Image (cartoon, helix red, strand yellow):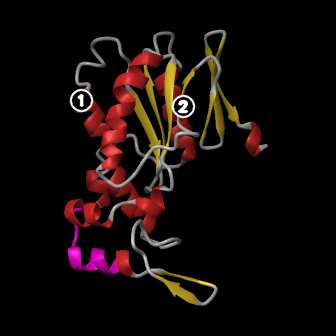
Amino acid sequence: IAETIADRNSYGFRPQRSTADAAAQCFGVLSRKVSAEWVLEGDIQGCFDNISHDWMIANLPMDKVILRKWLKAGYVYQSKLFPSLSGTPQGGIISPVLANMTLDGLETMLAKRFSNAKWTGKKLQLVRYADDFIITGYSKEWLENEVRPAVVEFLAQRGLVLSQEKTKITHIGNGFDFLGWNVRKYNGKLLIKPSKANI
């Protein structure tokens, strides 16, 4: 079920997809002379811990009895059982799939909300790996004043918020780190190399 509803540019915890594929998509989106020069670096605060159980039960296309059992299973830490009141079970094998299913639809929402963005030169693109994502755009102001509020609204419905400290809008000339890679345009050429934190 998860694969049938997955966003096209979602790369995390999916078959035949990896961080290298997400980096390749970044290259495809940002390497041309006419590519967007601004990037919204999105970071969801405590994504796995804060996803709304009510939202998942109401919206995920799967058996609700099984889903409720997964969500209420809790977790064991130092030989003690802790209940799960929100989010997906920590370390659970199903947690990444549930998180992906919760975030699937972001790409569709952006395409609907900004349906003319590709044709008006706004250069809207999304690349997502689990709860980390980038959204490209033609200007810092457009990303800040129109795109970011749309993302905030999408996440709020799911009990999630963007991290104020880690979410930022960056010019491609200054570069940004994404999934262990540093992505930067220098003299018209896009460079993708391991980030300093990963060396």
Foreground residue among 75 and 30 = 75
Residue 192 percent location from the top left of the image? 65, 29
- The span picked out in magenta is 60-70
- Does the magenta portion include 43? no
- Which residue lies at the image location 46% right of the left edge and 10% below the top edge? 34
User: Closer to the N terminus: mark 2 or mark 1?
Assistant: 1
Report whether 19 appears left or right of 54.
right
The residue that disc 2 covers is 168
Reply above or below: 146 against 138.
Answer: below
| Residue furthest bottom in the image | 79
Report whether 98 appears left or right of 25.
left
Instruction: Work out which quarter of the rendered image holds the N terminus and state it.
Output: bottom left
- Quadrant of the rendered structure where residue 96 is? bottom left
- Which residue lies at the image location 28% right of the left edge and 63% below the top edge? 56
- Does the magenta portion include 62? yes
Amino acid type of the residue tagged 2 in the rendering? Lys
Amino acid type of the residue tagged 1 in the rendering? Arg
